[in-house]
Amino acid sequence: MNARVTMPFQQFAFEPAFKPLQLTEIVQHSKDADCNNLLLPMLAGLSQRSSWLVLLEPPKSLNKQRLQEAGVDLKRVWILRRDQRHGIDLLAQRALQAGTCHTLICWHQGASDDALVEQLKATEIASQTECLLVRTQR
C-alpha cells in the first residue's frame, strides 16, 4: 500500500531585519591636512574582502594610480561620482540598498552635503554594510 501525503503550500515571507547603519566619522580639522595618506592602508585592507568597497565622491587626489600604488585591489572597488542625474544622497542610498558592499566611504564636500550626513544617520539597512564619512570641520 502506497501512502501519499500532501501538504498545503505555505508561503514564507522573508522580511529582513533592519538595523541602524553603523556610521563612523573622521573629522579633518584643517583643509591643509591630507588624511588620505592615513586612509590608504585601510583602503588596501578593505579591498581584500570578498564583497565590494564603495568610494563615494573621493577627492581627485585619490586617483586609480595612487590607489593601486597603495595596494588597493581595484577589481573589488566601486568609485562613484555624482552627476546631474545622480546626487550624492541617491548614490549612497542605492549602494546601501544593493546590499553587496561591505563598506561605503563617503567624502563630505561641503554644506551642500549636509543632507547626506543626516540621511546616513537616519538610515536603517538589512545588510552588514558599514559606513565611513570623511569630512573637514568648518
Image (spheres, grey):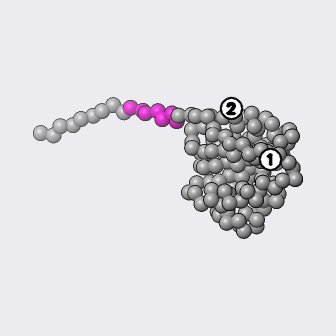
Query: Quick one: 85 or 71, which is closer to the camera?
Result: 71
Give the prevailing secondary structure in the magenta stretch. loop
Asked if residue 94 shows in the view, the reply is no
Residue 12 shown in magenta: yes
State the quadrant of the C terminus. top right
Query: Quick one: 42 or 33, which is closer to the camera?
Result: 33
Can you give x and y, in whole percent of width and height, for residue 40 in the image? Answer: 71, 59
102 w.r.t. 122: above or below: below
Can you give x and y, in whole percent of width and height, for residue 38 in the image? Answer: 73, 57
User: Which residue, given by chain and number where applicable, does mark 1 sit on?
Assistant: 28
Q: Is residue 68 left or right of residue 100?
A: right
Q: Earlier in the sequence, mark 2 or mark 1?
A: 1
User: Looking at the rendering, which quadrant does residue 108 occupy?
Assistant: top right
Q: Nearer the viewer, mark 2 or mark 1?
A: 1
User: Looking at the rendering, which quadrant does residue 76 occupy?
Assistant: bottom right
10 Å crowding of disc 1: few (<14), some (14-19), many (20+): some
User: Which stretch is magenta?
Assistant: 10-16
Look at the numbered disc 2 and give the secondary structure of its residue. Answer: helix
The residue type indicated by label 1 comes to Gln
Look at the numbered disc 1 and give the secondary structure of its residue. Answer: strand
Q: Tell me what residue is drawn at x 68 percent, y 32 percent.
A: 122
User: Which residue, given by chain and number where applicable, does mark 2 sit on?
Assistant: 122
Label placed on residue 44: none
State the quadrant of the N terminus. top left
The residue type indicated by label 2 comes to Ala
